[in-house]
Image (cartoon, grey):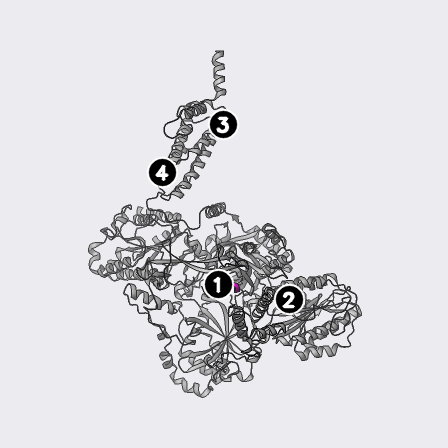
Amino acid sequence: MTTNKECLVIVLDIRNCAAEEFKLKSVKCAAEILKDKIVCSSKDHVSFVLVGSDSANNDNHCPNVTYFKKGVLQLCSWQMLLDLFTFVNATACEQGEWLDGIKVALDMQDKTLLFKPARQRILLLFDFNSVPQNYGEFNSITDKLLDSGIELIVGSHNIAYIDNTESGDAQAIFNFSRKCTPEELENQKYAMSLVPRCNATLCSFKETLQTVFRVTNRRPWSWNAKLHIGSKISINVQGVIAMKNQTPVKLQRVWADADEQVSRETRHFIKGAEVTPLPEDLMTGYMLGGTAVPYDDALIEPKAPHPPGLHFFGFIKRESVPDEYFCGDSLYVLVHQKGSTASANKLDALVRALDSSKHAMLCWKIYSPKLNTPKMVILLPKLPDDNHPATLYMLEVSYTSQHHFWDFPSLRTAKSECSDEQLEAIDRLIDSTDLECSLNDTQQPRQWRQNDLLPFDSLPSIFEQNVMDVLEWRVIKDRQNDKQFGEMLKDKNFVDVFWSVPEPLEEKSKQAAATVKKLFPLKQSRAWLEKLQAKEAAENALPIKAEPQEEEEIPIPADGVGLLTPVEDYTRLMTSVRTISNVTRRDAQVQALSAQVRVVIVTLLERKKLNLEQLGELISRYRDTCHDFNAFLEYERFADELKEIALAKGLKEFWQEVMQAKQLGRLLLGEQSLHEKETLKAYYTIDEWQAAEQATSGDA
Amino acid sequence: MSTWDPANDLDWVSGSEDEEDIAMKRDYHGREAILFVVDANLQTNGMTRLLEALNIIRTAFISGMLVNDKDLIGLVFANTKHSPLPLEASSVETIVVPENCAVFLPLRQLTKPIVEHYLEFMATVEDQFASEYGLAEPFGSGKFDLMIRLCIELLEKCGKKLNNAKIVYVTDVDTPHLPSSNEFQAALQKAIDLEGKEFEFHVIPMNDDFDYEPFYKEFITLSRAIDMDSFVEPDASLLREMLADRKLKQDFLRRCLGHFAFHLGPNLSMSVQYYNYFQRRALPRKVQIIRRDNSVVSTKRQIMVRKLDEQTQVVKHERQIKVCDGWYEFDLGDKPLKITMQRMNILRDMHKPHMQLLGFKHRSALPEVIYSKPSNFMYPDDQSIIGSKRLFRGLWERCLQREKIIIALFMSKRKSIPRYVALVPVQVEKSEAKTYRSQLCGDGFKIVYLPEAKHIRHIDMCDWNNTANSASDEKVDFFQKIIKRLRIDYQPNLINDPSLEYLQANLLAMSLDITTESRAFDDLLDTKVQDKRIEKYIPDYERLFDEEVMPAKKRPARDPADGASSSKLPKIDAEQIKSYPYVEFLIAEEQLTRCTVAQLQVILETHFGVQLPKSASKDKLVKHIEELSAAGKAMS
């Protein structure tokens, strides 16, 4: 099996004379690379070398150079990340030769040949400052790099890019923002000359990461197939993935502790009741509307698999290619079978013919005899260039039955017409947030390799970055509860970095947006917000799957008991609640309604002028409900509460004319015992008032 | 499931929560309903139009049954003279059926008997429709508003919760009531009712010279609450074609995948909504059936965790866990560190759903072929931020005119993942009115998802590059001729899903005894026609191009029975590992790695009675053997 494993040695500068900021950045850079390798490419081997350590530990007797662990490249792990953070804090000194670092790294790479790596690289992160270096071995070391095929990437700060006047390609240079000493210039000169001497890449920190992550693959996985046109013409091709929407983050999912057994079991149910049918009792079928139709292999004649490969369907005009209908998760390129000139010739001729006549090709794709479902694909020509032979892009297309047809009203209506001033403001926004043009006209050195602030080929994977960062913090800070964890996420600014216009444009863009804001009246709709909140509340309140309602159920009105017509509201709601056949649900509804009506009664009691008739009616209805639904205790508590209120507010009239007259005290079942009669009597009499009454009558 | 091994459960932490998945979950809250209303006026010019309409509905019935088994479908006749009761007469007891309307089928989930009943009815239409249903008098004009009222009543009293209800009116009368009449006003009032109740109304003209003005234009714009001047008149024949596939132009207001705010700068945002161009492949729902009585068995997968007593091997403790339980684990020296799923969810929820402008580029900057996931469509929405439509239009118009695309960062839903997108302005060209492109969408932005750097694979083609690759002009000419002979005009309905068609044809044949004329896929692969068209160029082909060389097989495929299934020759003698002392010697000398994986498995099985999954790595096997042997020593 071919694995594209990589061996990488990172050489770090820890000399005391190196800029502090530089050292921090380089450790961060190394950590990022390590994190990426831990979660994404588990087979790669990595190690580190320090230049500028006080002691020396290496096999080449180089002073001030220390290698990681025993100088053996290792598989990446979180432990290694922690070890790295302690490793770089080794006691540093002033001296240290970067060429020595590379020498040690080369030696370490030699030992890794055992692993048969597909790629060997050395990353040098070094501050080329004014401390003089010894370049005696420069030629021999660079020659060795070139011979061994080990790629060198040099990352440093104060690197800028400028377009080469002849080739137009971007070129890395040292940014001379301040005056350099002759020693510094000398160091920079050697660093620069690494590029022509051993094809090294010189880059800034940001570009360093991208260069390390950007790997080219010489032996990609490929799908071998034949492209047939008619029965006579056939071309041997290899399908290779060019883009695939697939995250490389892999984590081990654990279900239970080590001493427990995990198993996945299938349970069967008929109309909710669990059954245990024998396998031979079951057969597959399909739902045809509400009817199940058996569809078993025994009933259908088995078919011979379709022949694998690409089968021609038709040539279509390039402009009628429906890119909206492209589906699937990957983009393939078809290249001729490696080493076959006949296929190469045919594919080259086909691609050029397609390109010049502006056509594309529709084919049926059948992956293999096993994965035999035919898929329609579209093939688009790509002309050969210096790096690529003629190829065809291959994309899957969705079927008619899947398509949606929309009815969008035209955007150009009188109501949405913009004034000239408004259009001008939009133009200004476009110009001031242009990712390409603002850089084009200057020949100033810039901080990015490409003349584009957001090149399409280096968009970050935000989700993966977040996962890695969070895991890193989890490793560093072990014990945290969920709340601390949530706060840490907010704290660490994992989010906001991505959600803004690139920094160089930010200010200008902000101003242009402010002008647009002034000219276009925009108003948040209150109705929409309310609708949204109501929807959210409803979603939170209801179970996900509402049970099917019985036919005879009267749907419950959504309004509830109001203060204006509480008796009517309550009666109406109760009628519908009583129709609910599911007992549990009905009881729940009664409870909810009772709580509601109690609040209403208490609220009504707080009014200055009491509507005694209404109150009496409402309380007696509620009392009846409690009687019907066996809620004796509930009513007892409420009756006590009513007494308390009446007492506190001195609602004598209410008490006598409603509670006493209508006998709305606590509920009793059956014949009342003597004790019960006594308690009831005690409930209705309020001593203070009686005393007061007696007092007044006595006065009279 | 035997193929599932929890010990090797590597998880691709992904943002696989498809937008559509979420949209589907929302559909859980109710069913879709289509109520067909057929105008009895279709019978006036001979029965053909009526039959044609009924035929379209028949296909819609069948395809509906095949794909969306839970949908409700109903059928009503309008402008009839009589109002015969439907088969289940009791179902319309609670409904007031007005004059000149007849309910054929109240809203029901389709079943085999219903479809069979409809098919029987269709067979009798030609002879009996005129007498049984007749035509309203005079001039076949019943009251439009009453018909709509009946539809609303049927939909509201269908007994199921509806999520998306449509009334489809099939007619050839373009002005049911004159604009000056009271009926016209009454009908418009009903249009407003439809809007309020969120029922969609579609009219399918059965004649091509159908004039939407003045009645339907006003009725439809009112029922959808859009401006009169933004109404686009659809093509009647295309509508009919689509309806046969049970497709209707979708109402843009209700069927979007989501609403979100598009931030153009600090404090400047507009509200927009987005749509998909196509949905997921919908196959008939597969179920398990009990063989003897065809009752449907629902199955549930459960993950069980059991703790066994070490000595007795008796289950001490048992619990069921959900798919969302469990945790991620990684090694950190001596103790493993866990990340729970709850925390993963907090992580997923960090970004808030919205879209943020990052900048503009020229149209040409977008590579011709770039793909990461299917594109979406974006359209303004004045509901949440009033005034968005105008700002959207301004931006859209300037981008179109200046050939600019917008680069933005887009988080579509909660707990999905933020993605970089390019917004490409698109518009319906007048010249395209008749092609499929006009059906695709309207004016707005196409959302093209951009691949992340890690999604792009860089391939070094140096092993393929060769100066001999390039073909001579004569060879290119040859393929030019082939292209000319085999050109076709692309229509999206060319491409039907062969495996789905095959399955559907079989199901129909088995349950309803309908034979469909779907071509078998093998016929599609038949090259006879192609061969015939390019017949005369084949001699050129043979002359110009060399013969293909079969690619060399990587490894000779020898029969495993010959004992040659493994290409690796074992370095350790297979016989020797059967003796345990020899294995101990290997362990002591750290020579286990010299064994092949197969041999290690044999050691585990014969000496320790343990079986590891076939996928276990060599490292793991060696480690396991070493542990077991150490444990054995400790015991003794």
Residue type of the residue flagged with mark 2? Leu
Residue under pointer 1: B375
- Residues under labels 4 and 2: Cα distance? 70 Å
> Of the residues tagged 4 and 3, which is closer to the observer?
3
Q: Is residue A23 shown above or below B383?
A: below
Of callouts 4 and 2, the N-terminal one: 2
The residue beneath circle 2 is: A209
First to last magenta residue range: B5-10
Chain of the residue that carries numbered disc 3 in the rendered image: A
Q: CA distance from mark 3 to mark 1?
A: 67 Å
The percent coordinates of residue A583 (x first, y second) are: 38, 43
Q: Going by the image, does A604 lie left or right of B114?
A: right
Q: Are marks 4 and 1 on the same chain?
A: no
Mark sitting on residue A575: 4
> Is label 3 in a helix, a strand or a loop?
helix
From the image, state whether disc 1 or disc 2 is nearer to you.
2
For label 3, the residue is: A644
Are dots 4 and 3 in contact, CB under 8 Å?
no
Q: Nearer the viewer, residue B361 or A209?
A: A209
The relative height of residue A497 versus residue A158 in the rendered view (above or below) is above
